[in-house]
Image (cartoon, rainbow, N blue to C red):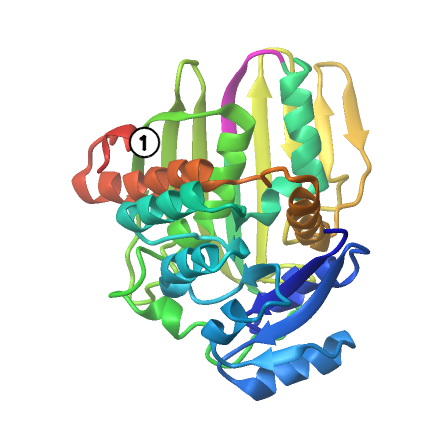
């Protein structure tokens, strides 16, 4: 195989961010689009300047012999069934996070991935964002010394000049309490938990307070803390709102700030989805010296990197990042956050069943 023939399944809001990396990759061809609303898929094809086959039924994608791989950009409650059927059909499967809504679903996915001759990965764009990648390198090479604290603050604002038009009905399924594990701490939290685990490793125990409101998605203000396994290091996740304050962003009205504290220095990732701070994207403080790192920092770079890793992993016969085992670790840690909030107790992710 010298080129991956890809089907994008789900042509809603997030496809506008996931698709460009595939469309621009010289070793990938988007040969099919699938959406239950044919007009939506046809509109994306025109927007992207391609002439793919249009399907309205996922089963038709799986029966399409010209499709090597699928990128699932569908509602989360559909993920486990679609991942498993895709692997059983002999397709490589990349699925938008969260990969599953329960540990039973995740176990079924892992079982199917273990039996398949193709690859499965969860699409986690934050792990490809250049400032986050560079931060991991600085942790790994000892620049920060022994890390003792990871902080990730997520701020929701009151508005932005977004470049991402929201597809009609995009939030309806997210408000379904019966079909979703949780709101922000589950859906957006997957990004932040993945990042903190990628930086620091496994999680020993978790405590959290998650605010529940009439808006099932919102869950603000909330905070979660964990202790990393086998090291004296904590991670803290904060969700807050400045509901009347506009946030400068080309994507969504949100902003992230990440801080890693080590024995030798302090590292800041100053932006991801938003552009609230007029600062370099990565700043290292070493006492009397501060080092600023300039690098690509448009959030779209993270999606482009994720697309490239899936395509190149397939062509090289290499498992792309965030396999079923990593996905299971992330999911059980998020579930532990909710269990802790409900019980008021520390929860050990490894003990969840």
Q: Residue at x 17, y 40 (%)?
A: 343
Q: Nearer the viewer, residue 139 or 249?
A: 139
> Is residue 352 a member of the stretch shown in magenta?
no
Q: Where is residue 331 shown, x and y percent of the image?
A: 37, 43
Q: Which residue was labeled with disc 1?
A: 206
* Principal secondary structure, stretch drawn in magenta: strand
Q: Where is residue 315 shown, x and y percent of the image?
A: 70, 45
Q: Secondary structure at mark 1?
A: strand
Q: Nearer the viewer, residue 35 or 292?
A: 35
Eyeballing the image, is 13 above or below 93? Answer: below
Eyeballing the image, is 51 above or below 276? Answer: below
Q: Is residue 275 visible?
A: no
Q: Residues within 10 Å of mark 1 (few under 14, many from 20)?
A: many
Q: Where is residue 203 shown, x and y percent of the image?
A: 38, 27
Q: Quadrant of residue 33?
A: bottom right
Specify the farthest residue to the bottom: 39
Eyeballing the image, is 258 above or below 189? Answer: above
Q: Residue at x 30, y 32 (%)?
A: 349
- Is residue 311 toward the left or the right of residue 233 in the image? right
Specify the farthest residue to the left: 343
Q: Nearer the viewer, residue 118 or 278?
A: 118
Q: Is residue 233 visible?
A: yes
Q: Residue at x 64, y 60 (%)?
A: 18
Q: Which residues are magenta?
A: 145-150
Q: How many marks?
A: 1
Q: Where is residue 94 shown, x and y percent of the image?
A: 54, 54
- Is residue 221 toward the left or the right of residue 67 in the image? left
Quadrant of image for the C terminus:
top left
Eyeballing the image, is 67 above or below 223? Answer: below
């Amino acid at each position: 195989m010298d080129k991956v023939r890809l089907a994008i399944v789900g042509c809603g809001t997030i496809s506008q961010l996931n698709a460009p990396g595939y469309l621009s990759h010289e070793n990938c061809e988007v040969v099919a689009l699938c959406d239950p609303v044919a007009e939506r898929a046809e509109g994306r094809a025109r927007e992207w300047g391609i002439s793919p086959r249009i399907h309205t039924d996922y089963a038709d994608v799986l029966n399409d012999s010209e499709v090597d791989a699928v990128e699932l950009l569908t509602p989360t409650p559909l993920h486990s069934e679609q991942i498993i059927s895709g692997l059983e059909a002999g397709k490589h499967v990349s699925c938008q996070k969260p990969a599953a809504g329960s540990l039973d679903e995740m176990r079924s996915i892992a079982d199917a991935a273990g039996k398949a001759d193709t690859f499965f990965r969860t699409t986690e764009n934050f792990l490809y964002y250049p400032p986050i990648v560079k931060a991991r390198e600085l942790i790994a090479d000892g620049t920060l010394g022994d890390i003792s604290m990871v902080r990730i603050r997520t701020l929701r604002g009151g508005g932005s000049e977004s470049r991402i038009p929201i597809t009609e009905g995009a939030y309806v399924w997210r408000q379904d309490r019966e079909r979703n594990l949780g709101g922000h701490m589950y859906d957006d939290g997957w990004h932040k938990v993945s990042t903190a685990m990628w930086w620091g490793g496994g999680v020993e125990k978790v405590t959290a307070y998650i605010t529940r409101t009439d808006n099932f998605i919102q869950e603000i203000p909330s905070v979660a803390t964990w202790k990393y396994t086998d090291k004296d290091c904590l991670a803290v996740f904060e969700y807050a709102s400045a509901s009347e304050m506009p946030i400068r962003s080309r994507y969504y009205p949100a902003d992230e700030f990440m801080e890693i504290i080590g024995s030798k220095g302090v590292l800041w990732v100053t932006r991801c989805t938003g552009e609230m701070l007029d600062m370099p994207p990565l700043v290292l403080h070493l006492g009397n010296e501060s080092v600023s790192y300039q690098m690509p920092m448009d959030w779209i770079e993270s999606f482009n990197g994720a697309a490239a890793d899936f395509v190149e992993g397939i062509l090289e016969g290499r498992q792309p990042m965030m396999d079923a085992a990593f996905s299971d670790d992330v999911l059980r840690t998020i579930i532990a956050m909710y269990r802790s909030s409900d019980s008021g107790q520390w929860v050990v992710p490894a003990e969840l069943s």
